[in-house]
Image (cartoon, rainbow, N blue to C red):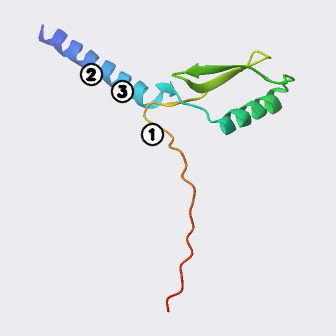
């Protein structure tokens, strides 16, 4: 009876460890695409696959944000990132101030 309890506890810990590893390294969520990212990704797709489409067939949206696209050739792209990664923040413009000479 005690041995069965130890086997159940061991199995539970193994299952928990596997779930945590999956969550950290495999679980993904979608991320919004900017207009520049969308254009660049589509151009890369056209160059790599030899696609002859002249435009994107449709945009894939989630929560009113563009997360991917479908091409006329049947290719589908969805921007994903790991759940454990920090979300990408908007880049702030670099402001360089000139120092005035001291008198």
Judged from this view, the residue extending furthest toward the top is 1
Alpha carbons under labels 1 and 2: distance apart: 28 Å
Q: Is residue 101 left or right of residue 86?
A: right
The residue labelled by disc 1 is 86
Residue displayed at 64% across by 25% down: 68
First along the sequence among labels 1 and 2? 2
Judged from this view, the residue extending furthest toward the front is 103
Residue displayed at 54% across by 30% down: 31
Front one among 2 and 36 = 36
The residue labelled by disc 3 is 20
Q: Residues within 10 Å of mark 1 (few under 14, many from 20)?
A: few
Judged from this view, the residue extending furthest toward the bottom is 103
Q: Secondary structure at mark 2?
A: helix
Q: For residue 95, which quarter of the picture? A: bottom right
The residue labelled by disc 2 is 13
Tell me if I can see residue 77 in this picture.
Answer: no
Residue 42 horizontal/vertical position (percent): 74, 30
Q: Residues within 10 Å of mark 3 (few under 14, many from 20)?
A: few
First along the sequence among labels 2 and 3? 2
Front one among 33 and 15 = 33
Question: Do callouts 1 and 3 mark residues in contact (Cβ within 8 Å)?
Answer: no
Q: Nearer the viewer, mark 1 or mark 3?
A: 1
Residue 63 horizontal/vertical position (percent): 51, 22
First along the sequence among labels 1 and 3? 3
Q: Is residue 28 above or below residue 36?
A: above
Q: Is residue 97 above or below residue 38?
A: below
Q: Is residue 1 above or below residue 44?
A: above
Residue 67 horizontal/vertical position (percent): 59, 26
Q: For residue 32, which quarter of the picture? A: top right
């Amino acid at each position: 009876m005690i041995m069965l309890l130890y086997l159940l506890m061991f199995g539970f810990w193994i299952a928990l460890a596997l779930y945590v590893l999956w969550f950290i390294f495999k679980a993904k969520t979608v991320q919004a695409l900017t207009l520049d990212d969308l254009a660049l990704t589509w151009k890369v797709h056209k160059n790599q696959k030899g696609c002859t489409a002249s435009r994107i067939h449709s945009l894939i949206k989630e929560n009113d944000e563009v997360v991917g696209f479908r091409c006329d050739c049947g290719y589908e792209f969805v921007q994903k990132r790991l759940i454990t990664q920090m979300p990408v923040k908007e880049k702030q413009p670099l402001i360089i101030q000139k120092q005035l000479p001291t008198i």
